Image (spheres, grey):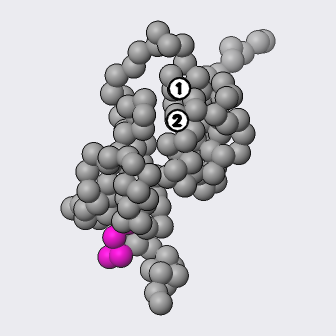
């Protein structure tokens, strides 16, 4: 006697897989050189590619931010934002200003427990740079931030 294959929702004792992390986010750009200069100016470290490449990867903690060269006729509209945690929101804000970029917001403390600011990259992708406020920071991280 043959049994039909079971689908995942028909296996009563199988554990549901857990999504562990985001490995990478890939953004399209019309001008790779301009985009690479922007991300490098903010402190992103390149791993692969560069200003002349069709695909560039930056290291972001344990993950990656990728840029892919898009056709000049490609268009996109607002889709959301990427939020990056950083060690010092205000220092990164000053770095963006010093590099000649204009963030959309000034750093501020939000009611949800983060200090953050927003900036758009040269292709209009919205980025947020944030850090949990001390009251919301995990205890081990608070200890490492003490003088």
Residue plotted at (36% across, 65% down): 90
Residue plotted at (64% across, 34% down): 51
| Quadrant location of the N terminus in the rendered image | top right
Image location (x, y in percent) of residue 26: 55, 32
Image location (x, y in percent) of residue 147: 47, 90
Q: Say whether residue 19 is visible.
A: no
Residue 32 lies, with reference to residue 40, above or below; the image says above
Span colored in magenta = 131-135
Between 76 and 11, the one lying in front of the other is 76
Residue plotted at (72% across, 15% down): 3
How busy is the neighbourhood of tag 2: few (under 14 within 10 Å), some, or many (20 plus)?
A: many
Q: Is residue 143 magenta?
A: no
Q: Are marks 2 and 1 in contact (CB under 8 Å)?
A: yes
Residue tagged 2: 35
Residue tagged 1: 31
Between 48 and 95, the one lying in front of the other is 95
Q: Say whether residue 121 is visible.
A: yes
Q: Residue furthest left?
A: 111
Residue 87 lies, with reference to residue 51, above or below; the image says below
Task: Locate residue 74 relative to residue 14 in the image: left or right.
Answer: left
């Amino acid at each position: 006697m043959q049994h039909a294959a079971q689908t995942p929702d028909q296996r009563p004792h199988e554990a549901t897989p857990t999504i562990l992390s985001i490995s990478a986010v890939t953004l399209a750009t019309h001008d790779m050189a301009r985009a690479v200069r922007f991300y490098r100016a903010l402190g992103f470290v390149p791993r692969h590619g560069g200003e002349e490449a069709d695909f560039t990867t930056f290291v972001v903690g344990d993950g990656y931010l990728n840029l892919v060269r898009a056709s000049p006729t490609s268009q996109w509209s607002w889709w959301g934002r990427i939020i990056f945690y950083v060690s010092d929101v205000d220092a990164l804000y000053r770095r963006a200003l010093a590099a000649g970029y204009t963030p959309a917001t000034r750093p501020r403390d939000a009611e949800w427990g983060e200090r953050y600011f927003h900036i758009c990259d040269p292709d209009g992708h919205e980025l947020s740079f944030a850090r949990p406020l001390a009251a919301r920071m995990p205890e081990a991280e608070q200890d490492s931030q003490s003088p």
